[in-house]
Image (tube, grey):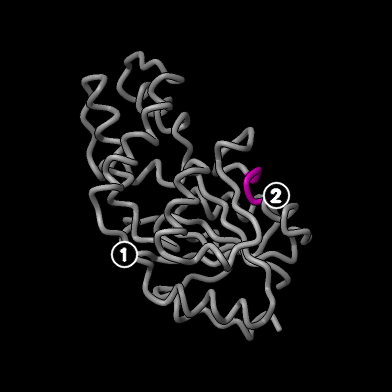
Amino acid sequence: MKAMLFDMDGVLIDSEPIHFAGRKRTLKRYGLEITDAELFNYQSTSAKVFLRGIAQKRGVDIPIDEAAEFIPLDFKTEFDNSEIKPIDGIKILLENLAAKNIPMAIASSSSPQLIREMIKRLDIEKYFTALVSGYEVTNGKPAPDIYLKAAEMVKVAPPECVVLEDSHNGVLAGKSAGMYCIGFRSPHSGNQDLSQADIIVNKISEINLNLWN
């Protein structure tokens, strides 16, 4: 391993419940209700992919571009009224990677502003060489674009990158990018299909960095 690339929500930060509340808030603007079970199907997807999926499933018209602008705003409303915490064990993992001089990047479907604000609040921004948002690539997860861009930004070839993901879509993105993928069964991410991951862990502390020495 010459670089480690992280999803953010549910991997670095316990923020999935806040994302769910924000997306519910956005859909209410258009008279739509959605359950947590439905939201789990769109975990780690971009705002537009999520909105198109819901519109198609419900057989309704949603002004996709307009609604996508509300997604980060509604998340921010929920975020400002919530207490967020790092996922157990993540700070120790970041410290251990930094001690080994392994470059790290975030590859998240969230907006650039939200990524910066979240990691600043948790005081972990110092660990990351690059931050890549799904808003900055043509195709969001499960396409590989975001991880390929992150690898380019840390100047490491994709096969030498390790990805840490907690969602089905995220694992598919990492594997499609030609990277080694660790699937993390986050308690906040529902029953995600992580079967395509190279290994699956139930706790961050189970990740053994010596595997890549």
**Dot 2 or dot 1, earlier in sequence:** 2
Give the quarter of the image for residue 30: top left
* 114 relative to 22 in the view: left or right: right
Name the residue: 74% across, 58% down: 158
Magenta stretch encompasses residue 200: no
User: Between 73 and 152, which is closer to the camera in this rendering?
Assistant: 73
Amino acid type at circle 2 is: Leu
Q: Position of residue 123 (x, y in %)?
A: 45, 66
Label 1 sits on a secondary structure element that is loop
Q: Position of residue 49 (x, y in %)?
A: 47, 31
| In the rendered image, the vertical position of residue 159 relative to residue 111, given as above or below | below
Q: Residue at x 26, y 35 (%)?
A: 24
Mark 2–mark 1 Cα distance, whole angstroms, equals 27 Å
Q: Are marks 2 and 1 in contact (CB under 8 Å)?
A: no
- Give the labeled residue for mark 1: 187
Q: Which mark is residue 148?
A: 2
Where, by quadrant of the figure, is residue 185 drawn? bottom left
- The residue at 49%/66% (across/down) is 124
Task: Please say if 99 is above or below 137.
Answer: below
Q: Quadrant of residue 78?
A: top left
Tell whether 72 sits left or right of 200.
left
Residue type, mark 1 in image: Pro
In x, y percent, where is residue 6? Answer: 55, 60
Q: Residues within 10 Å of mark 2 (few under 14, many from 20)?
A: many
Q: Which residues are magenta?
A: 144-149
Tell me the SS state at disc 2.
helix
